Image (spheres, rainbow, N blue to C red):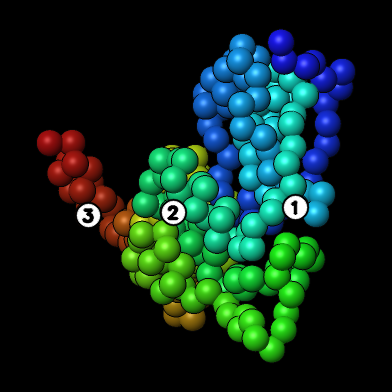
Amino acid sequence: MAQQSPQKQKMKIHPYAEMFPMASEHELEDMSKDIKKRGLLNPIITMDGAILDGRNRFEACQRCGVAPRYEEYQGRDALGDVLSWNLHRRQLSTSQRAIVASRFANMTRHDASTLGVTARGIAPTAEIRLVKVSSTEAAKMLNVSTRIVEQARSVQREAPELVKEIESGKITVGKADKEIRMKREEAKAFEQMRYTGDVGKTERPKDTDSATLYHLKRYWGHASKKDKQAFKEWISK
């Protein structure tokens, strides 16, 4: 019988593990039920006191009260191994993989010193060439296009609040990128209105307005009563 944990544990999550989204609530509940019934079959892999692989299993153990079982990482390429484990185990969409690739890009293989951890089994020497992963390389490793990786990086920079929406599968990187570009166009149009003096004649639309609605509101403020009436009759047909 699985050993019961008297209280919830706290564990740090390794930055490599954080590249990937958490499982959905439904998946975590199913995992929790399975661990409650059969115990934790695969140990949680740790490195330097942080969870390198298995944070979903750890969360499921916390939910069902089963004490986690840990094993220390013994490999030579933690970053590459975490990438391989997750891609083989999980069914991620193109947009979800693009977000992972955008995080993976510019990380240093065989050296995690910039993240404040130690790459187990690898020591920086003259014989070891430390290289940063480019966007192109990251795209190839995650089997996505370089273009969508750059779009994902743009979303992370300009609209980080949309990243969780992408990770949960609610929206795609393409849709998020389109929203960003539309807001850029709206901001540009608003600045042009300020420059021409039109800004005082119509209110700036809410952030939820599309670019089309933005311009409809803008020109509605300049339309004559006759034009407004004609437009109302046209859309009511």
Crowd class of label 2 (few under 14; some 14 to 19; many from 20; radius 10 Å): many
Judge left or right: residue 177 versus residue 73. left
- Comparing 198 with 104, the one in front is 104
Q: For the residues carrying marks 1 and 2, which lies nearer the camera in this image?
A: 1
In the image, taking residue 187 as reference, residue 11 lies left or right, namely right
Quarter holding the N terminus?
Answer: top right
Q: Which type of secondary structure does the marked residue at label 2 adopt? A: helix
- In the rendered image, residue 172, in percent from the top left (x then y), is placed at 39, 50
The residue type indicated by label 3 comes to Asp
| Label drawn at residue 47 | 1
Q: Earlier in the sequence, mark 2 or mark 3?
A: 2
Please say whether residue 13 is visible from this viewpoint.
no
What's the mark number on residue 227? 3
The residue that appears at 28% across and 58% down in the rendered structure is 224
Q: How many marks?
A: 3
Expressed as whole percent of the image width and height from the top left, the position of residue 171 reads 41, 45
Q: Nearer the viewer, mark 3 or mark 1?
A: 1
Identify which residue, 232 or 186, lies in the foreground. 186
Q: Amino acid at mark 2?
A: Arg
Residue 226, how many percent across, how many down?
22, 53
Assess whether mark 1 and mark 3 are in contact (beta carbons under 8 angstroms): no
Check the picture and name the quadrant holding the C terminus: top left
Residue type, label 1: Met
Q: What residue is pinned by disc 2?
A: 97
| Dot 1 or dot 2, earlier in sequence | 1
Q: Is residue 216 above or below residue 166?
A: below
Residue at 51%, 64% (x, y): give it: 102
Near-viewer residue (64 or 152): 64
Categorize mark 1 by other alpha carbons within 10 Å: few (<14), some (14-19), many (20+).
Answer: some
